[in-house]
Image (cartoon, helix red, strand yellow):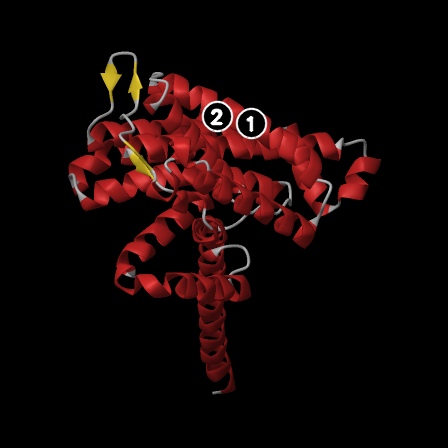
Amino acid sequence: MTNFLHRNVGILLLLIIVMILPVVIGSGFYINIMISVAIYSVTAIGMCLLVGYAGQISLAHAAFFAIGAYLSAILTTKWCLPPSLALFLSSMSVGIIAYLIGIVVLRFKGHYLAIVTLSVLVIVEVLIKELSFITGGDQGLSGIPFFSLGGLVFDSELKIYYLCWIILICIIIFSLNLVNSKIGRNLRAIKEGEDVARILGIRATNYKAQIFVLSSVYAAISGSLYAHYMTFITPQIASLGFAFEFILMVAFGGIGSIWGALYGVAGILFLSEYIRGFDEYRLVIYGVSLVVIMMFFPNGVLQGLQGFSRYLKCCMWNGRQKIFLHIVWGRLIK
């Protein structure tokens, strides 16, 4: 029981904060930001699993986010399916699409993989714009119903808030168990050295494909929730700028940290709200921020601040030692 509480203390704290936060912040601006944090964190956690643990760079997750959003929107507005069934079907469809794409693109490594996955993003954006008879083209899709499960319709900020955060907490629990399992250890081995991992009997190709599909399904769930939350989507969610925001969120929180993904998403979303007045310079600000993070906090701002805090404590301790030795030496020479 003690070990269980020790392992899950973070989850329990998060659950308590999620439950009481609406009472503290009320409705409106901050509750909407927290809903966005929950939705985007699902995709960011998937990217952490793929990039941080398996070492596979992907720029295609905004594309999977967009496919999940558009499929869910089309299934509910054109075919009148229930949103819960649409979310399930869109996620499974994205999983199959990601598997077919992964078979091809995961043959590449490093920067080549990043360029190929970027091509996937560009293709998806073009398809969304060109297939206007079903996607609405540049005008986007509107009239998307709120998410519903049985007879319960999530048509208020508070209902959507709890729905998104409960889904996110379930995904965090699953992901933490995954990275602490044998699969997580094998993924880290692949990241450290794929050839060595193969020599040790780890089937690197299978693991890479599986984690690519899983992270893509995360993005599809995130996209579907986004569509039913906003009730209106445009091709912008498949744009390079949107993909760049995801990368910045993951880099900000720490590429190899599930918890860091949450901090990264929250940090960038609040930052984007405060720089809304400089919208035309948004990409420039993001680009400079990414360069600064990569230069000074390569493991994420959170870990960087923790390291800096330890450094300050060490300096302060050494300073106290020097003062103490100076006092002792002063007394001895008297």
| Label 1 SS | helix
9 and 137: which is toward the camera = 137
Q: Which residue is at 46% across, 81% downward?
A: 331
Query: Can see residue 8?
Result: no
Query: In the image, residue 83 lies at what x, y percent?
Result: 34, 21
Left or right: 125 as drawn, with respect to 96: left
The N terminus: image quadrant: top left
Task: Provide the residue designation for mark 1.
Answer: 95
Q: Which residue is at 77% across, 38% downward?
A: 197
Q: Which residue is at 48% across, 52% downward?
A: 240
Left or right: 190 as drawn, with respect to 249: right
Q: Looking at this rendering, what residue extends furthest in the right direction?
A: 199
297 and 290: which is toward the camera = 290
Question: Would you identify the image quadrant in which residue 272 lies?
Answer: bottom left
Left or right: 75 as drawn, with respect to 45: left
Distance between the Cα atoms at labels 2 and 1? 6 Å
Question: Given contact means CB atoms under 8 Å apart, are the residues at marks 2 and 1 in contact?
Answer: yes
Residue 203 — which label?
Answer: none
Query: In the image, residue 90 lies at what x, y percent?
Result: 46, 25
Question: Which residue type carries mark 1?
Answer: Gly
| Label 2 SS | helix
Task: Provide the residue designation for mark 2.
Answer: 91
Query: In the image, residue 103 lies at what x, y percent?
Result: 69, 33
Q: Which residue is at 50% across, 27% downward?
A: 174
